[in-house]
Amino acid sequence: MASNADLVQYIADQCAGAGEITVKKMFGDYGIYCDGKIFGHICDDRFYIKPTEAVRPLLHTLDLRPPYDGAKPYFFIEDVDDHAYLSTLVRELCKVLPDPKQKLKK
């Protein structure tokens, strides 16, 4: 089941404040990026972020689930209505994620 485009945009808007938030359609659902770094997925109308020790203490609830079949567990974020909470999570998460790889020009 694919995610609702309006919900995807809502989650992206809620993460704003952490940096430049973009989403890309991937395999029927969405990857979500901050300043070019992929930090999570929106799959089946659910929001997941990469599990790191940097955000673990900030989580309201610790819930690890795979976003799709065969995936490693990610932090499932149920409360997508709290703008300050989401932007803080994303900002702290992206501090520890590696910079995106530069694409080679052909």
Image (cartoon, rainbow, N blue to C red):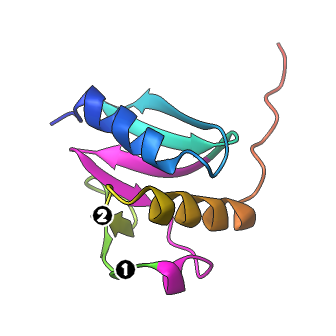
Q: Which of the pair 72/13 is nearer the observer?
A: 13
Q: What is the total number of numbered labels drawn onto the structure image? A: 2
Q: Position of residue 54 (x, y in %)?
A: 62, 78
Extreme residue toward the bottom, this view: 57
Q: Position of residue 1 (x, y in %)?
A: 15, 36
Extreme residue toward the left, this view: 1
Residue at x-position 45% and y-position 40%: 12
The quadrant of the picture occupied by the C terminus is: top right
Q: Which of the pair 106/2 is nearer the observer?
A: 2
Q: Are marks 2 and 1 in contact (CB under 8 Å)?
A: yes
Three-letter amino acid code at disc 1? His
Q: Is residue 73 visible?
A: no
Q: Position of residue 68 (x, y in %)?
A: 28, 52
Residue at x-position 65% and y-position 68%: 92
| Residue that numbered label 1 is attached to | 60
| Magenta-drawn stretch contains 41 | yes
Residue 101 lies in what quarter of the image?
A: top right
What is the magenta range?
38-58
Q: Earlier in the sequence, mark 2 or mark 1?
A: 1
Q: Secondary structure at mark 2?
A: loop
Three-letter amino acid code at disc 2? Asp
Residue at x-position 83% and y-position 25%: 104
Q: Is residue 39 above or below residue 10?
A: below
Mark 1 neighbour density, 10 Å: few (under 14) some (14–19) many (20 or more):
few
Disc marking residue 80: none
| Residue that numbered label 2 is attached to | 79
Q: Is residue 10 above or below residue 65?
A: above
Residue at x-position 34% and y-position 64%: 77
